Image: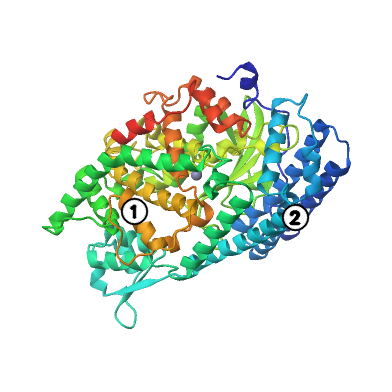
Amino acid sequence: MADDTETRTGSIPSSPLEPLELPGSGDWLTWVAEHGEGQLAEAAREVALVKSGPTDADTVLATWNRAETAIANAEAAHLWAEVHPDAAVRDRADELSQQVQKFVTELGQDRDLFAVFDGLSADGLDDGAVRVLEHTLRDFRRAGVDRDDATRDRLRELSEQGVKLSQDFGRNIRDDVRSIRVAPERLAGLPDDYRAAHPAGDDGLVAITTDYPDLVPFMTFASDGEARHELALTQNNVAWPANDQVLQDLLAVRRETASLLGYDSWPDLDTEVKMIGTGQAIADFIERISSASAERAAQDKGVLLARKQVDQPGADEVEVFEFRHYGELVRREQYDVDGQVVRTYFPFEQVRQGLLDVTGRLFGLEWTPVGRDEAGTWHDEVASYDVGLDGVRIGRIHLDLHPREGKFKHAAQFDLVKGVAGHQLPEGVLVCNFNRGLMEHDEVVTLFHEFGHLVHHVLGGQGEWLRFSGVATEWDFVEAPSQMLEEWAWDADVLATFARNAAGETIPVDLVAAMRRADQFGKGIYAAHQMSYAARSYYFHAGPNDDLTAFGDELQRRYSVFPPLEGAHMHCAFGHLDGYSSGYYTYMWSLVIAKDLFSAFDVDDMFAADVAGRYRDRVLGMGGRKDAADLVADFLGRPYSFDSWTAWLAE
Ligand SMILES: [Zn+2]
């Protein structure tokens, strides 16, 4: 449990600070370059001071904190590369990001710098400083700075090879857009706008690519099962065979890296800094989720098979590429949810204001609009707000929510400024690609999700240490707060505060109930199938295997309800094997924690101030100042458990 001291270190407003001054209609190219290079130069000066200045621990750590702050400020260039309307600014920002990356890599290998920290005594340091010192030393050791010269040389080589192999793996997927060509009548079942956007070519055939906007509606709505099969097979061969060897090489690099650093396996190295703790714990987690979801998954599959038999009497199997299609039919026919009606209740402007009102009320925050002239942002469509708590400005946020050319294609929260008490005000940016008119309910859920990261960034950015500022917890915890905030986008009372159609009618309670029921369908299958991905991610990294296709098929037979797709090589296009390495379990792990956190709230009173305030101060407001397991325990008054997730699965 949190004692008084810990509660006080929550999101209590610090001294008033000014937001970062952005150029607005001024010269962005110059500003981005000068700001980024200025911060890098500042970081270099502070690092030099760490190496040659006063050697008492408090001073060294404070200097190091300023260096890390300057590095983080320079890293924000990453944002401009994703959102700035001017391509020249985006390119310059990319160059800066590479410069920052190089600087950071060199620091990790700097033995003189390591020696300074290694020589510090933790005696007399407060808890926060001790944690900074421990984490800093851990980072250096994980980079191999304390190994002999030959080992360090080899580690550097492996690191360079790894970066190159990662880039190859990603590029092979990105560049290998494949397509099938089908007769126009095989588009039966697809919406009119989709068919209009896919006219036949000179040969009388229609091209359907493996890009998501083409692929997802086709796999969902096309009534021609053979055409869906053909497209699924095409998609599951993207980057085959090129990436098979790339992946084998990448896995070998990771295994050797882990071994040189003294770990039994790559997953052990990877999980050392995660909530889950060990590689073996991933294997255990996969088994646990798998057996917990087995019965529900089998039921779900029975429903899918029964629906398929309506189309194909005598069918005795449902294939993985039929999940979307029959899932959609079951939801439409058996749960009575018409997405076309649902979206009329979600006009964009109304949803955005509704989100601010809901989260403001929940966390006791005030959002004050800041005009573009004052905020100095990069585009007219960016909406900026100051964040107030108890009358004090504690941060600023920018919402950049619609698509435009050259902009980031997904939905994510970006750091603009990481908050450091007494030094700089936290500022975060949501970058999404939502409809300007009516939103799909999925989009509303995504907006709440991403906003969860943003609130975490601001509330967690009130402490003194940059390293623990904002969303700075273990990587397998960061999705939990945002997954939990999604619950507010599914609650009829919450939705009633802003979901209204053009006639001013509030979304009916019955419709929300039907949407919730429809959303429940298929979650057993989903959980099981996710474990077949998590198993590939873990077991591919845990030990060598000559035939990743056969091994992946075996894991799919073990964990998914769907048999492996004959002729598929999905591991070649499974991008997470690079980015997440052995950590694909993270998605389900965060969901388990999110359900547990949510169990403390009263579903009949989602705005109850005491529990929301406790969550704000003991979880979000703490940033990374404690291990995630301790944050959860401080909030719940007990260690985290699987019970809420298990109950959710059974609903
Ligand atoms: Zn997220």
Q: Identify the amino acid type marked 1.
A: Gln
Q: Residue 298 is drawn in which quadrant?
A: top left
Vertical position of residue 32 compared to residue 300: above or below:
below
Residue under the point 58% across and 25% down: 617
Residue toward you, 350 or 395:
395
Vertical position of residue 104 compared to residue 506: above or below:
below
Q: Is residue 231 visible?
A: yes
Q: CA distance from mark 1 to mark 2?
A: 43 Å
Instruction: Say which element carries label 2.
Output: helix
Label 1 crowding class (10 Å Cα cut-off): few <14, some 14-19, many 20+? Answer: many
| Sooner in the amino-acid sequence: mark 1 or mark 2 | 2
Residue under the point 55% across and 28% down: 631
Q: Quadrant of the N terminus?
A: top right
Left of 100 or right of it: where is 560? left
Q: Are marks 1 and 2 in contact (CB under 8 Å)?
A: no
- x and y percentages locating residue 385 in the rendered image: 60, 39
Q: Residue furthest right?
A: 53
Q: Residue furthest left?
A: 313
- x and y percentages locating residue 440 in the rendered image: 38, 48
Label 2 crowding class (10 Å Cα cut-off): few <14, some 14-19, many 20+? Answer: few
Q: Is residue 500 visible?
A: no
Q: Identify the amino acid type marked 2.
A: Asp
- x and y percentages locating residue 521 in the rendered image: 27, 43
Q: Residue furthest top?
A: 4
Give the residue number, with chain letter if any, for mark 2: 149
